[in-house]
């Protein structure tokens, strides 16, 4: 099993995102894991449609 900091995993978008969540002081260019940072399409796909209130 590889560690998330293994250089062989560099360039994998999902690994870069996860590294940013786990080590925000090192990978500060990654957005935090907040729904506000998701696209509207992703929110609708994984969470359902937002209310327009």
Image (cartoon, grey):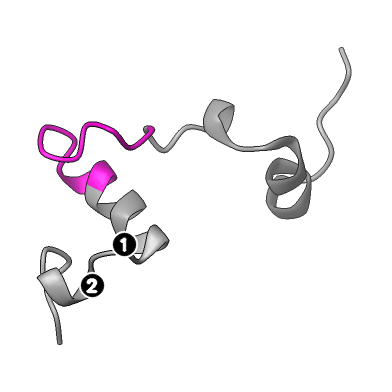
Q: Distance between the residues labelled 1 and 2?
A: 7 Å
Circle 1: is it few (<14), some (14-19), or many (20+) Cα within 10 Å? some
Name the disc covering residue 38, or none: none
- Main SS type for the magenta part? loop
Please report whichever mark, 1 or 2, sits nearer to the chain's N-terminal start: 2
Measured from the top left, where is residue 38 in percent x and y? 59, 37
Measured from the top left, where is residue 40 in percent x and y? 74, 36
**In this view of the protein, which residue sits in the foreground, 30 or 52?**
30
**In this figure, which residue is indicated by the disc labeled 2?**
9
Residue lying at the far front of the rendered structure: 11
Q: Please name the residue shown 69% across and 47% down the image.
A: 42
User: Is 3 a magenta residue?
Assistant: no
User: Is 29 a magenta residue?
Assistant: yes
Measured from the top left, where is residue 53 in percent x and y? 87, 12
Residue 21 lies left or right of residue 6; in this view the side is: right
Give, as a single range, the part of the protein colored magenta: 20-31
Q: Please name the residue shown 70% across and 42% down the image.
A: 43
Location of residue 29 by image quarter: top left
**In this view of the protein, which residue sits in the foreground, 48 or 24?**
24
Q: As displayed, is residue 39 above or below residue 14?
A: above
Location of residue 27 by image quarter: top left
Q: Please name the residue shown 14% across and 81% down the image.
A: 2
Task: Determine whether label 1 and label 2 are within 8 Å by CB.
Answer: yes
Q: As displayed, is residue 36 above or below residue 6?
A: above
Task: Name the secondary structure under disc 2.
Answer: helix
**In this figure, which residue is indicated by the disc labeled 1?**
15
Residue lying at the far top of the rendered structure: 53
Task: Name the secondary structure under disc 1.
Answer: helix
């Amino acid at each position: 099993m590889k560690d998330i900091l293994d250089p062989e995993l560099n360039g994998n978008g999902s690994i870069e995102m996860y590294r940013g969540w786990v080590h925000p002081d090192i990978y500060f260019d990654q957005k935090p894991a907040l729904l506000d940072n998701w696209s509207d399409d992703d929110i609708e796909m994984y969470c359902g449609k937002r209310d327009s209130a």
